[in-house]
C-alpha cells in the first residue's frame, strides 16, 4: 500500500520546495486566522505552483464560514480541503461538491463520524488531537479497534514517533506540523527529511 505523507503549515515557496524535495506527497496551507502558521492564499498559490501538480496542495480551515472556505481555496488553487471544527454534515458535503475533503475528527467523535461518512467517496477521515497543531500525540493503542481503513493520521507526529504510530494504526496517510519546525511557520529541513524517510520505511512493513 502506498502511504501518503503530508507536511503541513507551509508558509513560503522555500519551504514548499524543501518539503517536495524531501519527498512529501502533499503540502498543507493553514488558512485558519488563529494559527501561528497562517499563510495568505497568494503565497500558498505561489508555493503550490513552485512544486508542480504531482504534489497535492491542501487548504486547512477551522470553523470558518463556507463562502470564505470556498473563496480562499479557489484563490490559493488548492487540490483538497481539510476541515477542522464543529461543522454540520451539510457544510462538509457542500465543500465536498467542489474539493476532495479531509474531515478532521477527534478521538471522542471517531466512531460517530466513521458511521456518518462511510461510503461518501469525496470525504476522507483524518484523526487528530483535540488541539490542532498542538504537537500532542494520540493514544494509538487505545484507538486501534476504532481506526477506520483508509483514514489519515495526525497529532504530534514527527521523525521519532511516526513509525510507531503507523505500526499501531496503519493509516493511509500521515500528517504533521509542530515537530517539523525550527520555529512556528518555518520548517526544520532535517526534521522534514527524517519524517518523510521514517514514514516511507514504516510503510514497507504494511501487509501487501
Ligand atoms: O497547526 C495549526 O496551527 C492549525 C491550526 C488550525 C487548524 C489546524 C492546524 N494544524 C493541523 O494540526 C494537525 C497536526 O498538527 P501537529 O503535528 O500535532 O502539530 C495537522 O493536520 C495540521 O494541519
Image (cartoon, rainbow, N blue to C red):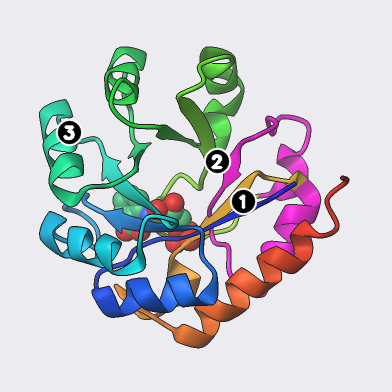
**Label 2 beta carbon within 8 A of ligand 1:** no
**Label 3 beta carbon within 8 A of ligand 1:** no
Q: Is mark 1 on a helix, strand or loop?
A: loop
Q: Give the range drawn in magenta.
A: 139-168
Which residue does the image show at 52% across and 39% down from the upper left? 126
Residues at marks 1 and 3 touching, judged by CB atoms closer than 8 Å: no
Q: Neighbour class for label 1 at 10 Å: few (<14), some, many (≥20)?
A: many
Q: How many labels sit on residues? A: 3
In the rendered image, the vertical position of residue 56 relative to residue 108, given as above or below: below
Alpha carbon separation for disc pair 1 and 3: 30 Å
Residue 138 numbered mark, or none: 1
Task: Measuring from the top left, give residue 176's x and y in whole percent.
Answer: 49, 61
Residues at marks 2 and 1 touching, judged by CB atoms closer than 8 Å: yes
Q: Mark 2 points at which residue?
A: 127
Which residue does the image show at 83% across and 51% down from the upper left? 206
Q: Neighbour class for label 2 at 10 Å: few (<14), some, many (≥20)?
A: many
For marks 2 and 1, give the one nearer the viewer.
Answer: 2
Ligand 1, image quadrant it occupies: bottom left
Alpha carbon separation for disc pair 2 and 3: 23 Å
Q: Name the residue under label 3.
A: 70
- Out of 169 and 5, give the one closest to the viewer: 5
Amino acid at each position: 500500500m502506498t502511504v501518503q505523507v503530508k507536511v503541513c503549515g507551509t508558509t513560503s515557496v522555500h519551504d514548499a520546495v524543501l518539503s517536495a524535495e524531501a519527498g512529501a506527497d502533499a503540502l498543507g496551507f493553514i488558512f485558519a486566522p488563529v494559527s501561528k502558521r497562517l499563510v495568505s492564499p497568494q503565497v500558498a498559490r505561489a508555493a503550490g505552483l513552485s512544486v508542480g501538480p504531482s504534489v497535492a496542495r491542501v487548504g486547512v480551515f477551522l470553523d470558518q464560514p463556507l463562502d470564505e472556505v470556498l473563496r480562499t481555496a479557489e484563490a490559493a488553487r488548492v487540490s483538497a480541503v481539510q476541515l477542522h471544527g464543529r461543522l454540520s454534515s451539510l457544510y462538509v458535503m457542500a465543500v465536498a461538491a467542489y474539493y476532495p475533503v479531509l474531515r478532521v475528527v477527534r478521538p471522542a467523535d471517531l466512531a460517530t463520524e466513521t458511521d456518518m461518512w462511510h461510503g461518501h467517496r469525496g470525504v476522507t477521515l483524518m484523526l487528530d488531537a483535540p488541539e490542532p497543531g498542538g504537537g500532542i500525540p494520540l493514544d494509538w493503542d487505545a484507538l486501534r479497534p476504532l481506526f477506520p481503513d483508509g483514514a489519515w493520521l495526525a497529532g504530534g507526529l514527527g521523525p521519532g514517533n511516526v513509525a510507531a504510530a503507523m505500526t499501531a494504526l496503519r493509516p493511509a496517510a500521515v500528517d504533521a506540523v509542530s515537530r517539523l519546525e525550527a520555529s512556528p511557520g518555518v520548517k526544520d529541513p532535517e526534521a522534514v527529511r527524517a519524517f518523510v524517510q521514517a514514514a516511507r520505511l514504516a510503510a514497507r512493513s504494511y501487509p501487501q
